Amino acid sequence: MTKQPVTPKIRCAVYTRKSNEEGLDVQFNTLDAQREACEAYIASQKSEGWFLVPDNYDDGGFSGGNLERPALKRLMKDIDAGKVDVVIVYKIDRLTRSLMDFTKLVETFDRRNVTFASITQAFNTTTSMGRLTLNILLSFAQFEREISAERIRDKFAASKKKGMWMGGHPPLGYIVQERKLVIHPTESETVRAIFHRFAEIGSATQLIQELAESGTAGKKGRPMDKGYLYRILNNRLYLGEVAYQGAIYAGEHEGIIERELWDAVHTILATNTREPRSSSTRVQTPAVLRGIIRCGHCDRAMKPTFSRKNGREYRYYTCQSADKNGANACTLRTVAAGNVERAVFDQVRGLLRTPEMMVRTFQAMDEGDTKTPESKSMESLRNLGTLWDELFPGEQARLLQLLVAKVNVSHQDVSVHLKTGGLKTLLTEMDTDDERSVS
């Protein structure tokens, strides 16, 4: 008796996509039509062992210009898990409109021995001719997408030149009615008061403090900081103008402030803008605690700042809360950089000499691949503690970044928190440096 050859089962997954959500709520939508056509195609290949997997992979309202689509991600996950043999789509651009993204998808398909079929375009990715034809079609799809994007940009630019509001969140002082900016009676008074008061005092820091004390807030009750204030003072919409790519156009909306007030404010802003200071001093004395120093009062990062008096430059670390919201926002505000850096140096230098650090050294050597003998590692750490002051500021900064996770500064003290793996990293670098010096 002759045995009939067994036809292998081929698991087929149907993927559908629609760029927008319009019409998806109807009983039989575009995604349903795509899936029905693909299922009919799979049924026609039943003799070849093709059958439909039970999962649906439908992306409604997602662009084909990228791969950030939930159903596609789920499909790729199932492909990686070996649950799919063939991916079926109605048209190639349902899968992607990007040639680069298509290349990534095909590479994944190849790794998992998955083939790809478009029922309205007879392609098979297992052949070189099929790949060539697919690449040509996708090139045209990507070209069409880029042309559409250019049309949108051109339309946007033309609308801006006419002074039209092109959407987004309206600034403080305006609301949107029938796609146009309309002055909000209460918020517009706040904007006028901000411009007038800044023209009087010329200080953003003082103005922020006054606004905070009076309870004045931005859009939707948002608290104001310096960044928010400067965005208001530099927004030409308040003049009744629209800015686009460096050009200024008359807007369709009504302005809130007068030209004279705008000019007065911007004269002060231009005067307050300082020329860039010489970088020589900063290079010689870098902010070695940058990124690791925090305000113990606000639990906010502190950033390096500078001031100049009588020809000398003074370095500080300033709490971000005080910098953005005014000096009264933080009781610590500013600390002298030299003082806090010396305190951190003393603590680190002392830690390098402690028995506890010696124990950590043994532990780090046991955990890592350090080849340096124990006695040499101990000696190197002792030397670092002894010779710390002789290191260049840049070298001190590099060692601090390796060893220290965080520095907390308060009125009472300066506390240093070491990194868990910092010592291991330091020993590895010391080992590498020794090897280089020998070679």
Image (cartoon, rainbow, N blue to C red):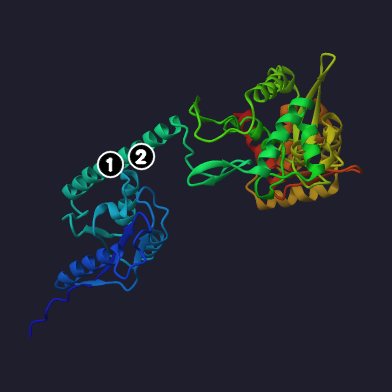
Given the image, on which type of amino acid does mark 2 rest?
Ala
Left or right? Give the position of 188 relative to 387. left
Q: Is residue 218 visible?
A: yes
- Numbered tag placed on residue 144 in the rendering: 1
- Report crowding for label 1: few under 14, some 14 to 19, many 20 or more residues within 10 A (C-alpha): few
Query: Quick one: which residue is furthest to the right in this view?
Result: 412
Q: Could you tell me how many numbered marks the image carries?
A: 2
User: Image height check: is 276 above or below 289?
Assistant: above
For disc 2, the marked residue is: 149
Front-most of residues 164 and 6: 164
Left or right, residue 85 beside residue 230:
left
Q: Nearer the viewer, residue 149 or 212?
A: 212
Res 256 → quadrant: top right
**Residue 89 screen position, x and y as percent:** 26, 60
Can you give x and y, in whole percent of width and height, for residue 249 in the image?
Answer: 49, 27
Amino acid tagged 1 = Glu
Q: Is residue 202 visible?
A: no
Q: Is residue 102 left or right of residue 162?
A: left
Identify the mark nearer the N-term, 1 or 2. 1
Position in image of residue 75 (x %, y %): 37, 62
